[in-house]
Image: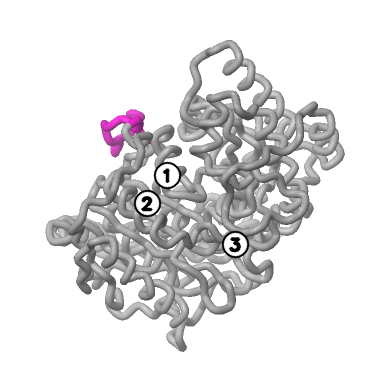
Amino acid sequence: MDPINTPDRADGISRRAFGHAIGSAAIGGTLLGVTTAEGQLRSGSDPLVLLDATELAARLRAKQISAREVMTAHLAQIERVNPKVNAIVTLVAERALADAARADEVIARGGPVGVLHGLPVAHKDLVATAGIRTTFGSPFYKDFVPTADAPIVTRIRAAGAITVGKTNTPEFGAGSQTFNTVFGATRNPYDLSRTCGGSSGGAAVSLACGFVPIADGSDTGGSLRNPAAFCNIVGLRPSPGRVGRDASWSPLSVSGPMARSVADVALFLSAIAGPDGGPLALAEAGSRFAAPLEALPKGARVAWWKDLGGVPVEPAVRAAVDANRRVFEDLGCKVEEAEPDFAGVADAFARLRFLDNYARYAPLVREKPEWVKDTIKYEVAQADTLTAAQISKAHSRQSALYDEARLFFERFDYFVLPVTQVVPFDVTVPFPTRINDVALGTYIDWMRSCTYVSLMANPAISVPAGFTPEGLPVGLQIVGRHRGEWPLLQMAHAFEQATRHGRRRPAIV
C-alpha cells in the first residue's frame, strides 16, 4: 500500500491533494547557509529538513524563517523520500500548512509562543490524534478516527508544534520490527533491505530522512531506543511518570522524545514532561529540560558493561560499542567494568509484559484471531497459563531489581551498554531467532539489552555509536540514576559532541 495514497478525508490526503497543497503554498526559495548534518544533501532536498530543532525554533522566533517555509520543505521531503521507506503512513498536509500559516500569524503579531512553535512533528500511530486516523497498526482500527488527542499530543500542540501525520508501528506496538498488515513494513534508510527496528520505527526513519525534526514514541522493551540505534538518531526512555501516558500503575511502558540530537531531545522533553495526575506522575515541571546542556563534570563514574549475564551479542555490535570506551575516558570519566545482576530478569519482564497486554489483546484474539499476529496470540496464551506464584515472583524480582539498581548507582553515575544485541536485520524477518548460534526462545529475547533496563525503571538514552564495516548504524545506551534525566542528557550530549557519529545521514536523503 502506498503510504501517501490515502483518501481525501480527515485522516489523510491523496497524492494529488498533497501536490496541490505544496504547489499552492506561495513560499520563497530554499534557505541557504543553514547548519545541517555533515555530508551532501541529494538534489531536491531543502537544507531546512536537516536543521536541528533547536536552531529551527530559534530562527522561527527571530522571524528569520517562516513556519510555512519550514513546513513546505518538510512536506516536499516526505513526498520525495517517504515512498522508499514507508515511515509516514497517514499524512495531513493541507491541515499542516494551514496550521503553519496560523503559527506565522502568532509570531507576526507578537503573541505568546511555546518552545516548539512552528516545528513539524509526527505522532506514533499508537497515540490518539483527534480528527486524524489512528490505526494501532491493526485491521481492527484501520479506519478509526479518534475524537480526542492523547495527553502527549495535547502537550506537543500546546508547545506550538504542528502535526504532519502519523508514523508507522508494528501491530499494537508489539515487537521491535516495524511492520503490520495495514501499511506494510518500514525500511531502514541506511539499507532499504533491512529493518528500522521498532516499535517507534516510523518515527526514527522520519527523523533520519528529514521528514520532521522531532517525533514522539513509546517504549516498553526498547521501542524508543532500538529504532534510534538502527537509524542513527537519539531516543530517550524517560523515567516512569516523567511524561504523561495513561492511568496505569505499571512502570513498564513510557512515552518519550526522539530527535536527531541530544539537545533536540532535551528541548522536546521540556514540552512533554510534567505532572498529569496519573498514579506514577512525577511532580517536577518539564521546563527545566529547556536549559542549555552544561559541560559534563569531570570524574564521572561510568560502569562499562561486561556480558549482561551471558546475553549473546553480535561481534559487530560489541566492537562498535566497545570502541567508544576511550571516548568516556577522554571526557574525564572513571570507567570500570561492572553491571547489575540480571539473573531472573528476563522471565520477570516477559511475565509482567504479558499481564500488561492481556486485557487489551485477549478480547481481540477471541473475536477475530485471523486479524491478530502470532506473537500477540502467543502473549495472550502465555498470560492465560501464568500462575499466582509466577506473577508474585515476577513482581518480587521487579522490586528487587529496582533496589539493586539504586545501590548500583550509589557506586556509579552512569551505566553504558549496547542498545541492541544485533545489527539491523532483513526487513522480511519478523524477529531474530538466533544470535551467535545461540537459539532464542521468544520474539523479545533478542532485546534483553533493553528489556533489562526497562525493568530497572531508570532513564536510558540511545545515542549513535558508529557504524559497522557494512555501513549499518549501531547505538550505545547510557543509563542514568533513577529520575536522573538531566545528568543523563548532559553525559549523552558530551558523548555526542565528542564523536559526532549522529551527523552521518542516509544516502537517500
Labels 1 & 2 near each other (Cβ < 8 A): yes
Locate residue 63 relative to residue 94 in the image: left or right: left
* Residue position for label 2: 493
- In the rendering, which numbered label is found on residue 263? 1
Work out how far the residue at label 3 is from the one at label 1, CA to CA, in angstroms. 37 Å
Label 2 neighbour load within 10 Å: few <14, some 14-19, many 20+: many
Amino acid marked by disc 3: Lys
Pair 3/1: label in front: 1
Q: Which of marks 3 and 2 is nearer the N terminus?
A: 3
Occupied quadrant, residue 23: top right
Three-letter residue code for mark 2: His
Within 10 Å of the Cα at label 3, are there few (<14), some (14-19), or many (20+) other Cα atoms?
A: some
Q: In this view, does 187 lie above or below 494?
A: below
- Identity of the residue drawn at 27% across and 54% down: 480
Residue 93: say if magenta.
no
Q: Give the range drawn in magenta.
A: 273-287
The one of 272 and 341 positioned closer to us in this rendering? 272
Query: At numbered mark 3, what does the secondary structure look like: helix, strand or loop?
Result: loop
Residue type (three-letter) at the residue carrying disc 1: Ala
Image coloring type: one colour
**Would you say residue 278 sits in the magenta stretch?**
yes
